[in-house]
């Protein structure tokens, strides 16, 4: 599936929730289900520090694709991290750079990606794009 | 007599609104309080009819503005019972007040090897300016610790104070633990060794009557926006004997006596410390807020706030897995807590969905987070316009949200 198709899939998953509590309960559920980041990657250099919560982001570049691992100490953020990984992990730099996480808007959680939230999520998206940019340049040189 | 809270709430139109479809419950008062209509109208009227720069011209509006500004200073003087109005300096708030003292007192009185005492429970605003001052003068910052229940280890003060100690800075009320510190006792002990004391009253002035002469503190600092006034205005009270000896903090207009390129002499108090155009609009709103408070029976408001925090504490303690940080015998204003297994960000996010505004995060008090070994806390903080019904709704919300995890 393309990034856009997965985003559409997520939007449809959330469209069933009328009550905000169900939506957050679902985020908490997928946050709980997220595979924890390998402890050896839960290090300062992978830490994206928000005032409110922290996000750790690790990546590896294999066969032209970037594999991301990530985690947050806050569960709602972790749920959103899981969604971002579903979209952006195991993708080529070109795919990552060519797509915005519009699903967050569509499922009514845009406030979590606002710069004022300082939960680390916005910085995580930026960081994923920076990695993509860097790997794209490296690949071009080869 | 119990205050009429429903009448008071009518003065705060901002409270009467829905957030995320639910009636707003505003429990973030330690960060900023809401302003009553009396403050908003005073500021508006001033901006609509009178505005002109102060102390600088002979025309009608300039005179009116100057009068209003100086009357505001007098209102603040009365509020804290300072001996003279010139001992009240208008600043942008508590943070600037502390920076001013740390800089100017440091220039006058601190040399290499001297010592400054702060406490482990201070807000960053009452730590960092002193650290900066210590760096400038090669002085040493010493820290009075607190016990796990949130009380300061006053017993250690005698050991902390040495013949090198030059100043001590302590919060009246902790912005995280809610502890009402025994500032009278601390001041008395420090004064035995002739050490001046600065009281950070950011969380104290909103909840207690302040009498700086009875306290005998050397400096008392607080903010307008935490006592129902505008942002960007606050006060520094300093005893004249110290302020007279301290050099200016900022240079510019108004603070001078005469200026030549060879030598500038400084204006008298309080203008020496009010360089540039002060926030006179803020000062007028600040005074309106103080008048608003004083138009009520202050003691009844204080008693009511005490009932609120005691009720909230008792309620929260019923929640299994909820830990309150700070359990001092006398608390005011704030309750910080965590619930086992729930990140404060998650709780704050979900409470917001229920229309309840709390503060979450590190609360500008990293050393307090470190003391308890936590990254963040949730803070509920109260003002006299809050109600017991709101506390009940808060309690029920926490029970409901806890079940989601």
Image: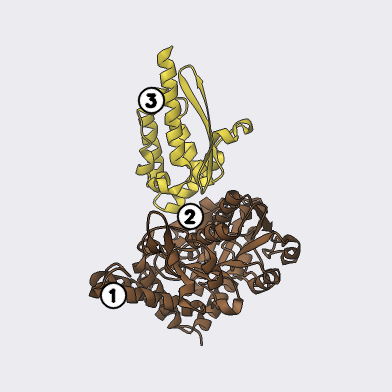
Chain colours: A yellow, B brown
Q: Which of B123 and B402 is in front in this view?
A: B123
Q: Which of B17 and B53 is in front in this view?
A: B53
Residue visible at 46% across and 41% down in the picture: A121
* Image side of residue B48 versus residue B207, left or right: left
In this image, B366 relative to B397: left or right?
A: right
- The residue at the far bottom in this view is B1
Q: Which chain carries label 2?
A: B
Name which quarter of the figure residue B20 lies in.
bottom left
Query: Marks 2 and 3: CB-CB under 8 Å?
Result: no
The spot of residue A62 in percent (x, y) is 50, 19
Name the residue tied to disc 3.
Answer: A95
Q: In this view, does B288 lie to the left or right of B134?
A: left
Return the x and y of residue B169 as percentages of the image width and height: 61, 63
Q: Name the residue under label 2.
A: B350
Q: Can residue B331 be spotted in the picture?
A: yes
Q: How many labels does the image show?
A: 3
Q: Up-down: is A130 above or below B191?
A: above
Q: Which chain carries label 3?
A: A
- Residue to which mark 1 is pinned: B63
């Amino acid at each position: 599936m393309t990034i856009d198709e997965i985003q559409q899939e997520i939007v449809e998953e959330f469209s069933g929730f009328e009550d905000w509590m169900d939506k957050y309960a679902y985020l908490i559920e997928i946050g709980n289900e997220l595979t924890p980041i390998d402890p050896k990657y839960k290090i300062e250099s992978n830490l994206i520090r928000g005032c409110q919560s922290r996000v750790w982001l690790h990546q590896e570049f294999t066969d032209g694709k970037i594999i991301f691992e990530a985690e947050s100490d806050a569960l709602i953020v972790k749920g959103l991290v899981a969604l971002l990984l579903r979209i952006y992990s195991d993708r080529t730099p070109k795919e990552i750079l060519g797509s915005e996480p519009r699903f967050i808007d569509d499922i009514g959680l845009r406030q979590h990606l606002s710069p004022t939230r300082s939960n680390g999520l916005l910085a995580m998206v930026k960081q994923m794009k920076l990695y993509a940019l860097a790997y794209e340049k490296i690949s071009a040189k080869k | 007599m119990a205050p009429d809270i429903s009448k008071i709430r009518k003065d705060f139109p901002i409270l009467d609104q829905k957030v995320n479809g639910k009636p707003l419950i505003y429990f973030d008062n330690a960060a900023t309080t809401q302003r009553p209509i009396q403050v908003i109208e005073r500021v508006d009227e001033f901006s609509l009819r009178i505005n002109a720069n102060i102390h600088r011209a002979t025309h009608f509006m300039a005179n009116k503005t100057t009068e209003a500004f100086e009357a505001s200073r007098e209102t603040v003087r009365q509020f804290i019972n300072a001996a003279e109005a010139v001992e009240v300096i208008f600043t942008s708030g508590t943070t600037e007040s502390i920076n001013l003292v740390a800089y100017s007192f440091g220039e006058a009185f601190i040399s290499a090897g001297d010592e400054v005492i702060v406490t482990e429970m201070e807000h960053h605003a009452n730590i960092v300016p002193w650290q900066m001052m210590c760096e400038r003068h090669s002085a040493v910052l010493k820290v009075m610790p607190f016990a796990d229940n949130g009380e300061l280890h006053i017993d250690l003060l005698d050991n902390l104070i040495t013949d090198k100690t030059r100043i001590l800075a302590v919060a009246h009320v902790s912005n995280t633990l809610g502890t009402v510190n025994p500032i009278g006792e601390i001041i008395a002990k420090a004064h035995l060794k002739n050490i001046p004391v600065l009281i950070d009253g950011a969380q104290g002035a909103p909840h207690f009557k302040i009498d700086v002469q009875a306290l005998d503190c050397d400096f008392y600092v607080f903010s307008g926006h935490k006592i129902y006034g505008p942002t960007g205005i606050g006060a520094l009270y300093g005893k004249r004997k110290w302020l007279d000896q301290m050099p200016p903090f900022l240079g510019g207009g108004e603070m001078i006596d005469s200026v030549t390129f060879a030598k500038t002499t400084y204006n008298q108090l309080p203008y020496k410390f009010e360089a540039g155009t002060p926030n006179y609009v803020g000062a007028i709103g600040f005074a309106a807020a103080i008048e608003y408070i004083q138009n009520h029976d202050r003691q009844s408001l204080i008693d009511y706030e005490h009932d609120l925090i005691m009720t909230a504490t008792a309620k929260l303690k019923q929640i299994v897995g909820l830990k309150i940080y700070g359990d001092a015998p006398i608390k005011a204003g704030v309750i910080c807590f965590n619930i086992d297994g729930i990140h404060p960000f998650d709780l704050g996010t979900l409470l917001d969905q229920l229309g309840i505004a709390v503060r979450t995060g590190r609360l500008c008090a990293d050393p307090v987070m470190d003391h308890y070994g936590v990254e963040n806390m949730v803070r509920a903080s109260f003002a006299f316009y809050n109600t017991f019904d709101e506390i009940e709704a808060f309690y029920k919300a926490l029970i409901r949200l806890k079940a989601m995890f």
